[in-house]
Amino acid sequence: MSSTLLLGKLALITGAGGGIGRATAVRFAQEGATVIVTDRKIKQAEETAKKLGGTHLPLELDVTNADNVQSVIEEAINKYKRPPSITVNCAGITRDAFILKMDDSDFDLVLNVNLKGTYLVMKHVVQKMIEHKVGGAIVNISSITAKMGNMGQCNYAPSKAAVETLTRVAAKEFAKFGIRVNTVIPGFVHTPMTDHVPDKVKELILKQIALKRFGEPEEISDTIAFLSSDKSSFVTGASIEVSGGQS
């Protein structure tokens, strides 16, 4: 059933080719938004856009490449004659290993995608929002691992902790432009990223969750939609945990 929570809004979503990003794109379209569906894998972005119907725009985006980020935003502005007023940074990767076995290039890659990618997208979107005098909302995706410090995630956990801190900085810097910035902190959610987790590890994680089940991407997108809408007009610099009570 469609509704009007985001009616008339233009939204840019990174990592929208699957998982939380795809679920968010679907939810936004249901709520009346036009979605710029971006992903490093263009075919997956196109698959998401097909699910949405309408006039949504799938684009290939490498969030670590500043020139690519700028060109995608410019292409969206050229098509819709305005910058997105909503941005959701879902793009993220893992390259798990213990500290003593971590390849330095994998450490750098995860930080570049998860942290620098979020920074680059925010920076260039907000520049255009200011130029066009458009207010709005940005939602960045962290992770419960940022708080728990999971073994074997010496790159991923710090990258997501830094995203939360970056969000608080951005919230203070962008408030004067009418731009709110918040973080969603998902717990363990069924996504392509978590599909590879061994069953024994999943059993251990399940014991940490108060609700005794894993989350679904749609449950995360509900919170993202709220933070992107005018219903959260007095919320900025906040971090909302959606983890089923995982600790």
Image (tube, rainbow, N blue to C red):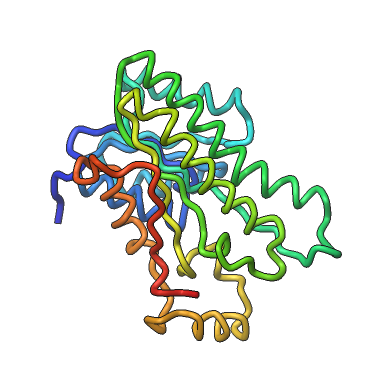
In this picture, residue 153 sits left or right of residue 52: right
In the image, residue 5 lies at what x, y percent? 17, 45
Relative to 217, residue 228 above or below: above
Residue plotted at (45% across, 20% down): 127
Residue plotted at (55% across, 68% down): 194
In this picture, residue 227 sits left or right of residue 42: left
In the image, residue 180 lies at what x, y percent? 34, 36
Question: Front-most of 244 and 190?
Answer: 244
Residue plotted at (47% across, 67% down): 187
Residue, far right: 100
Question: Front-most of 9 and 208?
Answer: 208
Relative to 222, residue 152 above or below: below
In the image, residue 22 lies at what x, y percent? 40, 52
Query: If the image is split into quadrants, where does the N terminus sit?
Result: bottom left
Q: Quadrant of residue 135?
A: top left
Question: Front-most of 207 and 198?
Answer: 207
Residue, far front: 172
Residue plotted at (20% across, 40% down): 230
Relative to 131, residue 29 above or below: below
In the image, residue 45 lies at what x, y percent? 46, 44
